[in-house]
Amino acid sequence: QVQLVESGGGSVQPGGSLRLSCAASGIFGINVMAWYRQAPGKERELVAVSSSRDNTNYADSVKGRFTLSRDNAKNTVYLQMNSLKTEDTAVYYCKVGPVWGQGTQVTVSS
C-alpha cells in the first residue's frame, strides 16, 4: 500500500524557518516529487517540483527562500522554507508520483 507521511509543519513568526518532510513507502521507481500548498479560499498551487534527473523548479513566490531536496535512498522529499512570510500560510501537501500526502499546516504569524 502506497503511503506518504508528512511532518514538520507548525507556527512560526515572519522571517522564521521550517523544514517539511515527506516519507514515501510502498512506491517504487519514483520520478517526480513535489510540494504544493493551499491557502484558505485559494486553489492548490505548485510550490516546487523535482524530477528524477534533479531538475528542480520553484514558484516565483518562493524562489530564493525555499529549497526542495530529496533522498532517493529513503524515498523522502524535503522542503526547507526560510524567510517565511505571512502569505506562505497554507496547508502544504507533498506529491510523490501520483500519490498525495495528507497535508501539514504551516502558519506564519506575528
Image (cartoon, rainbow, N blue to C red):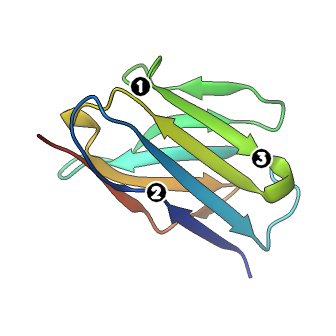
Residue under the image location 54 percent in, 41 percent down:
79
Q: Is residue 94 left or right of residue 55?
A: left
SS at mark 1?
Answer: loop
Q: Is residue 78 left or right of residue 59?
A: right
Instruction: Classify 10 Å Cα crowding around label 1: few (below 14), some (14-19), many (20 and above).
Output: some
SS at mark 3?
Answer: strand
Residue under the image location 86 percent in, 53 percent down:
73
Q: Are marks 3 and 1 in contact (CB under 8 Å)?
A: no
Rendered image: mark on residue 31: none
Rendered image: mark on residue 8: 2
Gap between marks 3 and 1, in whole Å?
Answer: 21 Å
Please state which of the two labelled residues, at mark 1 or mark 2, is closer to the viewer.
Answer: 2
Identified by mark 1, the residue type is Val
Write down the residue under mark 3: 71
SS at mark 2?
Answer: loop
Instruction: Classify 10 Å Cα crowding around label 3: few (below 14), some (14-19), many (20 and above).
Output: few
Write down the residue under mark 1: 62
x and y, in percent, of residue 5 in the image = 58, 69
Q: Is residue 15 left or right of residue 74?
A: left
x and y, in percent, of residue 67 in the image = 56, 30
* Image-quadrant location for residue 25: bottom right
Q: Quick one: label 1 or label 2, which is nearer the N terminus? A: 2
Task: Indicate whether 106 appears above or below 25.
Answer: above
Identified by mark 3, the residue type is Asp
Task: Indicate whether 33 appears above or below 81.
Answer: below
Residue under the image location 31 percent in, 34 percent down:
16
Q: Quick one: label 3 or label 1, which is nearer the N terminus? A: 1
Q: Are marks 1 and 2 in contact (CB under 8 Å)?
A: no
Identified by mark 2, the residue type is Gly
Placement of the N terminus among the 4 image quadrants: bottom right
